[in-house]
Amino acid sequence: MIGDPLLSHLAQGALILALAALGLIIVQFASKRAIERLQSSDRMPDERRQQVITLAHVIRWGANVLILATAVLMLLSTFGVDISPLLASAGVTALAVSLGAQSLLKDFIGGLLILIENQYAVGDVIEVGSVSGSVEEITLRTTHVRGLNGNLYIVPNGEVRIVANQTKEWSRAVVDLGVAYEEDLDRALGVLQESAEAFAREPELGSQLLEPPNVVGPISLGDWAITVRVTAKTRPGKQWEIGRQLQRFLLAACEREGISLPYPRQEVWVRNLAVEAAGPDDK
């Protein structure tokens, strides 16, 4: 007779665990399918798609926490633990925790503001302080950033004060070239402009441009060269590839037209003080 209630509690506990596991599986499956459909959809702008995918990640995280917390409370109630005092003291406990974990609350509030204001989303390339890389995951507490060297940086959302989003709406490729002082600057600018216009007519590369490339110069007078800048407005995240291809395109055009692109060098003047002191008549 003693074992009957225990068996009943164990059966109820097993049912609760099974339902919780089923709920977690359903959440994972539904979120995965939703994210895959969003990634393959062409009806939604890229920026909006990234925002919805980020919200899907956060909702999945919140649903997992809710399912696990509910399962724990139901298990405690099933085995005769009175959870009423626990629920009644939740407000007092939350107040005590808030006083001792203000930074945690700041992180949660920061995460909510990031999502509401759409400051950045999963897949964006951002720079936060000394951390730079691609956003892999956003939760209400942290942002996971994968650096170019492969390091995964976990940034508390409360520490995000100034963030540079390098893939928001549009981007810009910037290429600086040094033209020798001996060259005809107007001719060099004309060659670069013609080359930039030809670059925009390339089928694969031109489709990534939002505006034709623009040649600006000179922007500075260096020790051994005149710096000329070429800029191109691109689709979000395409500025690095466009910049590399544009450099190759401009370099080939300068080599073809015989325009010298100098490298850093130093000139050394040797003076014969004895000859200079003797004068021209004593040579």
Image (spheres, grey):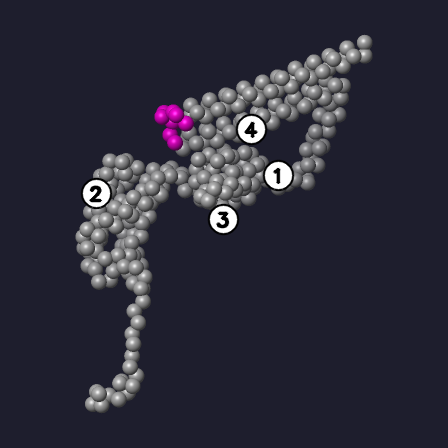
Q: Earlier in the sequence, mark 1 or mark 3?
A: 1
> Is the Cβ of the residue at disc 2 closer than 8 Å to that at disc 1?
no
Callout 3 environment at 10 Å: few (<14), some (14 to 19), or many (20+)? few
Does residue 105 show up? yes
* In the foreground, 250 or 229: 250
Position of the N terminus, as image quadrant, is top right
Dot 2: what SS?
helix
Residue 198 numbered tag:
2
Query: With 110 as the anchor, is 211 left or right in this view?
Result: left
Q: Which residue is mark 3?
A: 130
* In the foreground, 264 or 109: 264
Dot 1: what SS?
helix
Q: CA distance from mark 1 to mark 4?
A: 17 Å
Up-down relation of residue 59 to residue 79 (above or below): below
Q: Which residue is mark 4?
A: 61
Dot 3: what SS?
loop
Residue at the (28%, 87%) spot, across then down: 277
Residue 136: x %, y % from top left: 48, 36
Q: Which residue is mark 1?
A: 104
Q: CA distance from mark 2 to mark 1?
A: 54 Å
Q: Earlier in the sequence, mark 3 or mark 4?
A: 4
Q: Residue furthest right?
A: 2
Dot 4: what SS?
helix
